[in-house]
Image: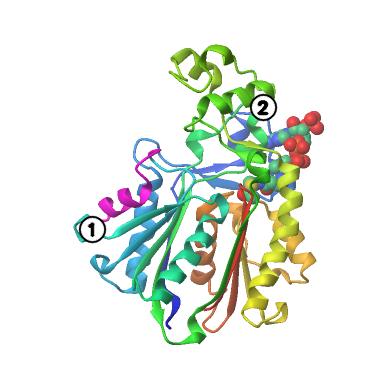
Amino acid sequence: MPHSTITGIGHYVPKNIVTNQDLTEVMETSDAWIRERTGIEERRYIDRTKETTTTLAVEASLKAIADAGIDKQDIDFIIFATLSPDYYFPGSGVLLQRELGISGTEIAALDIRAQCSGFIYGLSTADQFIKSGMYKKILLVGAEVHSVGLDFSTRGRNVSVIFGDGAGAVIIEPTEDKDVAVLSTKMHSDGTYAEKLSYMYPGAHGGYFLEKYAMEGFGVDYDLENNKYGGVFWNQDMLDKARVFPHMEGQAVFKMAVRKFPEVIMETLTDAGLGIEDLDMLIPHQANLRINQFVANTMGLRDDQVYNNIMRYGNTTAASIPLALSEARDEGKIKKGDLVTLASFGAGFTWAAAVLRW
Ligand code: ACO
């Protein structure tokens, strides 16, 4: 049975840098508050006239394809992880296929949600298809545009200062060499916490969620009696009043994240017959620098064993791990033969990890 290996990697971020200081001009916040609690110094926002989640994905994918030295026409499967697709449907996988100019190959394009864990869920999915022999050149992308959907009022500032836009992509191919392979992947979720970190707009059950929002005091004026589960849920007046944004109970997320990261990291290492002492580099999802520092301390890892770039990009959810992996490789922080662990925790809650020999 073949193993899967990453043969190409690339990332792309929009040119527009938004510093913490810039945010103080549009909302009530401060550079000190953001740095102290999250470690973030700046993030990137797209140019809304030209860029979308798919265009960021195209740039990252072209770099990964060139890095792998393959012909894009030979890609036989696309996996696109995002929580911020261009369209509600169709998914972004087919848009990427079209923009890459490979629609003619008629290969399958799969969208993965799983939020901050989307990239590792995608890697695990790709790993199974490579092992089964079904696909041989998989393009896996994590790309996000958050900047267009954030609440810059005081109510939303705990969320809006965190998120940024970006993309990362990898090419995954089969190998017989276990010394350059994905050694283990593990995925988990617990829907008990679905609303702790969520974006309920509008959804197939917009009325139901609006009702919940109304009950939770979000100031939604919604006629529950007349519009519940049927007919037209939304008219312009409702939309104006009910414009909802990402919602996060930050402390609940923080507490669960610092528990689940070490658990799933150890689970994958153990599954690969390895221990924490074998780890060369941990590349965690970039949600909050304080979460990653907490996890590093808990697991007894040195600073140089954990790669962070959240300072420059904020939290780019499904894009954060390939973006960090790509930069870590470019900066020479991971070298051939290193044992690298990727780990994520995010909305759902979902969490996952992957161990690979670079
Ligand atoms: N600027 C200034 N003040 C702010 C801001 C801001 N951007 N946001 C919130 N505040 C204020 C609040 O209004 C509140 O003021 P009050 O005490 O006068 O009422 C105070 O700061 C504390 O607010 P909290 O929301 O309780 O802030 P907290 O200390 O929990 O920090 C944070 C928020 C940074 C999000 C933290 O909860 C956290 O790190 N949580 C982890 C979750 C996370 O990192 N999520 C990232 C995305 S999820 C993921 O990818 C896993």
Q: Nearer the viewer, residue 256 or 99?
A: 256
Q: How is the image coloured?
A: rainbow
Q: Is mark 1 within 8 Å of ligand 1?
A: no
Residue 280 to residue 296: above or below:
below
For disc 2, the neighbor class at 10 Å (few under 14, some 14 to 19, many from 20) is: few
Q: What residue is shown with label 2?
A: 154
Q: What residue is shown with label 1?
A: 106
Residue 282, image x and y in percent? Answer: 63, 69
Q: Number of numbered discs present?
A: 2
Residue 220, image x and y in percent? Answer: 60, 18
Q: Amino acid at mark 2?
A: Thr
Residue 254 to residue 23: above or below:
below
- Res 304 seen here: no
Confirm or deny contact between disc 2 and disc 1 (CB under 8 A). Answer: no
Q: Amino acid at mark 1?
A: Glu
Can you tell which of label 2 and label 1 is closer to the viewer? 1
Residue 257, image x and y in percent? Answer: 71, 54
Please tell me whether residue 94 belongs to the stretch shown in magenta: yes
Residue 6, image x and y in percent? Answer: 44, 73
In this rendering, position of residue 298 left or right of residue 84: right
| Tag 2 secondary structure | helix
Q: Which residues are magenta?
A: 87-100
